[in-house]
Image (cartoon, rainbow, N blue to C red):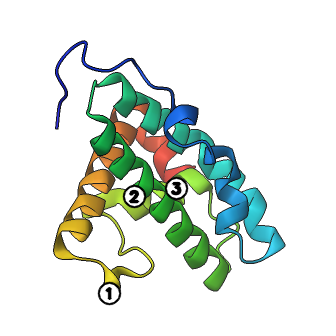
Amino acid sequence: MVRKAGTEQSMTLRELSPDFDEWPERWMGLKVDLEYGKKLLPYMEEFLNNLIKRDLSRKTLKDHIDNTWLLGGSIIRQVSTYEEYKTAPLKKLTASVETGGMLPDGYDGMTERDLKAFERTCELFEEFLKKTTPKKKRRAG
C-alpha cells in the first residue's frame, strides 16, 4: 500500500523498529548464533531502508519489518539446527527468500493472510538482492 505524499514524515528504520539492533540477540538460541545473526543484519537493514524510501504506509512498513524479523529468526533456527555456520550469511539469506521464501517458524499458527504477507516480503527481498548484489556474490556469499 502506498501512502499519499506528505501525509507522514519520513520515518527511519530505528524509529519504526527501535529494537532492530537487538534482533541477533533475540534470534539467538546458542551463543554461536549471535555472530551469524549480526552478519545478516546489514543486508536486512539495507533492504528495509530501501522499502522506507518507497513511501509505503507505516502499517505496510511495519508488516515488512515484522516479516523480516521472522525471516531472520527462521534462518538462525535452521542454521543452528543443521549446523550451517560455514554457509555464508548472504548465500543463506538468498536461498531463504527465493521463490516466495521459506516457511517461517510458527507458520502453522499463522493466518493465510499473514503467510501471504510473509511471502510478499520474501519476494521483495529477493528482487532487492537481485538488483543490488551480483549473482556470483549471492551464490558464494
Say which label, 1 or 2, has the lower sequence index: 2
Q: Residue at x 60, y 39 (%)?
A: 42
Q: In the image shown, does 58 or 112 lie closer to the viewer?
A: 58
Q: Nearer the viewer, mark 3 or mark 2?
A: 2
Res 59 seen here: yes
Q: Could you tell me which quadrant the N terminus lies in?
A: top left
Task: State the residue position of label 1.
Answer: 108
Residue 37: percent from left, percent from top = 67, 58
In this image, 2 relative to 95: left or right? left
Mark 2 residue crowding within 10 angstroms, few (<14) / some (14–19) / many (20+) = many
Task: State the residue position of label 2.
Answer: 67
Q: Which mark is residue 91?
A: 3
Q: In the image shown, does 1 or 136 lie closer to the viewer?
A: 1
Mark 3 residue crowding within 10 angstroms, few (<14) / some (14–19) / many (20+) = some
Res 82 seen here: no
Q: Residue at x 64, y 67 (%)?
A: 27
Say which label, 3 or 2, has the lower sequence index: 2
Q: Residue at x 70, y 52 (%)?
A: 22
Say which label, 1 or 3, has the lower sequence index: 3
In this image, 121 relative to 37: left or right? left
In this image, 97 relative to 87: left or right? left
Residue 140: percent from left, percent from top = 55, 51
Q: Nearer the viewer, mark 1 or mark 3?
A: 1
The three-letter code of the residue at mark 3 reads: Lys
Query: Quick one: which residue is furthest to the top in this view?
Result: 6
The three-letter code of the residue at mark 2 reads: Asn
The three-letter code of the residue at mark 1 reads: Asp
SS under mark 1: helix
Q: Is residue 125 above or below residue 99?
A: above
Q: In the image shown, does 23 or 57 lie closer to the viewer?
A: 57
> Distance between the Cα atoms at labels 3 and 2?
19 Å
